[in-house]
Image (cartoon, rainbow, N blue to C red):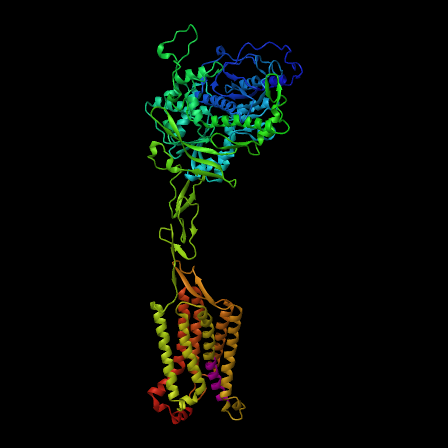
């Protein structure tokens, strides 16, 4: 049926414009039935207004007939919307009283009701265009209105129906309650919205949920196209921001009384959703009837249960929803929505408008076709027609005051919609002012009855209107963005209810664009008064209890991602906030505490002289050094004895000195490593040990060569002597010096921090730099030791006067055993234990050489001096 009406409208509009171009031409007779709700005032130029105050359910009548009271059921008057009508009247009055805006030109207005109906919206839009004393669509008859712009409508559907007609004539349309669709923005260049971009509201909802950590949210959405569009945009945003919808309840816009089963089915569905204890936060998207429908549903639930049902919820209302009372609901309270948060088109209080509302009786005129129905519905009284008797207690006196009405019936504070209408009227006035000030239309021409804009067409205002920018009487800048949307944001209001069925809205925040263009939420949590069931404690709205610190989320199979279990953090990881998706590692210089909900700074450790292990190793090193020095002193003191002479005094002294230095070099590994100590630790140890092992190798080779040289005719005699021994020691040591030099040149050792070996400690140690060079040093010492072992093993049974080969064999066996076991032990330990292993290996291998080689000689020199004689040595030969 609607499509048929639209087709008829288009046929009418497409008729030629030439039939009544002359004002004196006689036009078809006027429609005898007048629109019951309209308000007009004459002026040089006109602003039209299409508002929504009355909602009628009427029969399917032919389009040519206009609705009359006989055709209507009982009217549903939204008394709150009368303020929108008064806001336009007040704005026009202020503009006309201000000569600085439009001098010598007065603005008139004509306001119609859309009745929240598509057919009536089309008709009233045509009335604005063509009706003065009579209604002739697409004809210019009699005196014209000089209509410059139209302000309306309230909802998206109403605005689109209006735009279908107004866009044909390119007449500017400024909507005051609906958001611009992308289609209207791209196709209708005369379409302006006095509200911000709706995307800002979506961002505000998400930021609000994130701010209060509400992740399990119920949705109440009205069953119409914009409601489905709302879900289409919001649900992906939920998923992207870790929020889940506990349920999505689609509520009817209108339910006829004959559909009793459907009504109770809807109510049961609402009751089931409201009893979901986990979903403490509910989002409502709809129109002004959405709140009224929910209040009625709760009233029926309470009546059926015969008790007062209190649902503790946090309601988040979109800007399209208002708290209104219809008919019998005027005595119902708003306790259900106590503590709710609603987005509202930003508005500022105008003192003059409040005074205007208080004196509304003085401004009442017969031309106001809205006033009578509003007054009767708002004050529940009756203005009788002549001849009709009304009881005294039911008759309107005219002395009733608007400020006595509850907020659900009428608000004395300027609403966001009224503020948008007020700014829209001023925007058109300032655009006309700019036109009058421009060079092209600067000259004012007197035509007939007025001085104004005789040749100005409505479509010419668009270029001026789009670029308009002015400060209104509240001091706020009014301007449009590139999409012809009003710049600005949304206020966030907290609903505070009172026992007398009234309420108050307190501004607790704002969502707006920052100076950099970012969408940001500002909220003052301290001002919010929650529903009484929450005891002024921040409500939770989660599928399950949040995971405490020290735990991480573990998803439940088959359920939404907002429903999860809590699992303790694995070893070595923490979570320091509630509801963390995954645990994380502490910084390298910290480690997890026992509860795994925080990090503790690691203690810096190194093998120091003060701890027991360090004291023990240092003591052993000093003790071994003293023993070695004592042995050296004994050998020096008895240097001329046969046993010292027979074992090559120079090699013996060199070996003892190198062993002494080996014991002392272990002290470099104790204490806090520094740059110098790291450079000396491995290189000094490697070179000194190479000297010691080279001395042992020289001793072994000298013993073997000495036996061969004693054979008759042997040519080896020339090789036996100090020169060979010195050459062996020098060459063996120089090779190790070369390896160490390459190491220090390429990648030298350096002080480092080991933060991973021990969980609770940071170990200060020397990083060897090049691991390859480190093992080359060890490998070369191993090669020298292995060579000495093989040569000594082969010479162990040679019949010498005092053959050291057997003792060298044992010493090299001990040396090799220590360093072979050192490699796996070193690699398997961590932290300062690695240092302890290396020190122990140095001490053990050095002690092995000292004990195996020198203990027999010291025994003879000190305890059995009678054996330290040439006769005893010669006797052993035989």
Is residue 706 covered in magenta? yes
* Observer able to see residue 288: yes
Q: Is residue 136 left or right of residue 387?
A: right
Image coordinates for residue 866, horizontal then vertical, percent: 34, 91
The residue under the point 50% across, 17% down is: 39
Q: Quadrant of residue 631?
A: bottom left
Comparing 101 with 127, the one in front is: 101
Image coordinates for residue 67, horizontal then vertical, percent: 52, 13
* Observer able to see residue 559: no
**Most frequent secondary structure within the magenta stretch:** helix
What quarter of the picture does the N terminus occupy? top right
Q: Quadrant of residue 185?
A: top right
137 is higher (above) or lower (below) than 192: above
Image coordinates for residue 429, horizontal then vertical, percent: 55, 26
Q: Is residue 661 left or right of residue 163?
A: left
Q: Is residue 803 left or right of residue 455?
A: left
Q: Residue furthest top?
A: 387
The residue under the point 51% across, 16% down is: 38
Q: Quadrant of residue 190?
A: top right
Comparing 371 with 75, the one in front is: 371
What quarter of the picture does the C terminus occupy? bottom left
Is residue 222 covered in magenta? no
Image coordinates for residue 726, horizontal then vertical, percent: 49, 85
Residue stretch in magenta: 694-708
């Amino acid at each position: 049926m609607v499509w048929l009406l639209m087709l008829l409208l288009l046929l009418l509009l497409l008729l030629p414009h030439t039939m009544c171009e002359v004002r004196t031409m006689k036009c078809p007779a006027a429609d005898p039935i007048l629109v019951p709700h309209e308000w007009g005032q004459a002026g040089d130029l006109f602003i039209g207004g299409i508002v929504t105050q009355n909602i009628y359910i009427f029969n399917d009548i032919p389009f040519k007939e206009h609705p009359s009271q006989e055709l209507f059921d009982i009217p549903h008057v939204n008394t709150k919307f009368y303020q929108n009508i008064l806001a336009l009247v007040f704005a026009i009055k202020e503009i006309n009283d201000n000569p600085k805006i439009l001098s010598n030109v007065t603005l008139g207005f004509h306001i119609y009701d859309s009745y929240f109906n598509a057919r009536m919206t089309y008709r009233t839009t045509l009335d604005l265009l063509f009706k003065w004393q009579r209604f002739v669509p697409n004809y210019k008859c009699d005196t014209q209105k000089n209509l410059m712009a139209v302000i309306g409508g309230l909802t998206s559907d109403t605005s689109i129906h209006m735009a279908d007609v107004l866009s044909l004539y390119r007449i500017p349309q400024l909507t005051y309650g609906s958001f611009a669709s992308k289609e209207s923005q791209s196709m209708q260049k005369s379409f302006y919205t006095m509200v911000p971009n709706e995307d800002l509201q979506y961002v505000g909802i998400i930021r609000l949920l994130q701010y209060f950590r509400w992740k399990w949210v119920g949705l109440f959405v009205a069953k119409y196209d914009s409601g489905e569009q709302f879900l289409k945009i919001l649900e992906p945003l939920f998923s992207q921001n870790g929020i889940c919808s506990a349920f999505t309840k689609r509520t009817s816009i209108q339910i006829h009384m004959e559909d009793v089963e459907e009504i109770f089915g809807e109510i049961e569905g609402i009751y089931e959703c409201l009893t979901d204890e986990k979903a403490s936060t509910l989002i409502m998207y709809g129109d002004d009837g959405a709140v009224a429908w929910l209040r009625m549903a709760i009233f029926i639930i309470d009546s059926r249960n015969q008790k007062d049902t209190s649902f503790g919820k946090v309601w988040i209302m979109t800007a399209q929803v208002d708290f209104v009372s219809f008919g019998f609901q005027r005595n119902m309270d708003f306790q259900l929505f106590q503590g709710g948060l609603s987005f509202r088109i930003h508005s500022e209080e105008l003192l003059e408008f409040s005074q205007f509302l208080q004196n509304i009786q003085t401004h009442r005129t017969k031309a106001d076709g809205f006033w009578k129905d509003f007054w009767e519905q708002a004050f529940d009284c009756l203005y009788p027609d002549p001849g009709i008797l009304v009881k005294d207690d039911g008759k309107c006196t005219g002395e009733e005051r608007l400020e006595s009405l509850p907020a659900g019936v009428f608000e004395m504070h300027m609403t966001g919609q009224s503020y948008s209408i007020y700014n829209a009227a001023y925007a058109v006035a300032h655009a006309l002012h700019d036109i009058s000030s421009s060079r092209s239309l600067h000259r004012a021409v007197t035509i007939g009855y007025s001085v104004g804009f005789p040749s100005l067409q409505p479509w010419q205002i668009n270029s001026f209107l789009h670029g308009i920018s002015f400060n209104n009487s509240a001091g706020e800048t009014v301007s449009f963005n590139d999409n012809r949307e009003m710049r600005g944001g949304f206020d966030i209001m907290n609903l505070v209810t009172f026992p007398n069925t009234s309420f108050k809205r307190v501004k607790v925040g704002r969502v707006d664009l920052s100076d950099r263009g970012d969408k940001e939420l500002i909220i003052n949590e301290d001002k919010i008064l929650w529903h009484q069931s929450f005891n002024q404690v921040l409500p939770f709205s989660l599928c399950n209890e949040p995971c405490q610190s020290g735990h991480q989320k573990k998803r439940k199979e088959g359920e939404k991602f907002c429903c999860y279990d809590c699992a303790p953090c694995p070893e070595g990881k923490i979570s320091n906030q509630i509801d963390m998706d995954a645990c994380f590692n502490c910084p390298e210089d910290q480690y997890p505490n026992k509860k795994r909900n925080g990090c503790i700074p690691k203690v810096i450790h190194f093998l120091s002289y003060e701890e027991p292990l360090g004291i023990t190793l240092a003591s052993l090193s000093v003790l071994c050094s003293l023993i070695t020095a004592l042995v050296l002193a004994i050998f020096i003191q008895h240097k001329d004895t046969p046993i010292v002479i027979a074992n090559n005094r120079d090699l013996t002294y060199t070996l003892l000195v190198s062993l002494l230095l080996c014991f002392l070099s272990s002290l470099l590994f104790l204490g806090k490593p520094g740059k110098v100590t790291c450079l000396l630790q491995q290189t000094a140890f490697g070179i000194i040990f190479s000297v010691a092992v080279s001395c042992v190798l020289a001793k072994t080779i000298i013993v073997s060569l000495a036996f061969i040289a004693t054979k008759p005719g042997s040519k080896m005699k020339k090789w036996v002597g100090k020169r060979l021994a010195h050459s062996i020691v020098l060459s063996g040591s120089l090779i190790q010096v070369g390896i160490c030099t390459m190491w220090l040149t390429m990648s030298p050792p350096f002080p480092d921090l080991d933060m991973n070996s021990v969980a609770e400690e940071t170990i200060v140690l020397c990083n060897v730099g090049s691991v390859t060079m480190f093992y080359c040093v060890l490998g070369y010492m191993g090669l020298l030791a292995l060579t000495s072992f093989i040569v000594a093993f082969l010479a162990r049974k040679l019949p010498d006067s005092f053959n050291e080969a057997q003792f060298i064999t044992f010493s090299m066996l001990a040396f090799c055993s220590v360093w072979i076991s050192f490699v796996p032990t070193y690699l398997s330990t961590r932290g300062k234990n690695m240092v302890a292993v290396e020190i122990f290996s140095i001490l053990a291998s050095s002690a092995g050489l000292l004990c195996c080689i020198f203990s027999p000689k010291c025994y003879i020199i000190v305890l059995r001096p009678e054996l330290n004689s040439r006769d005893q040595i010669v006797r052993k030969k035989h």
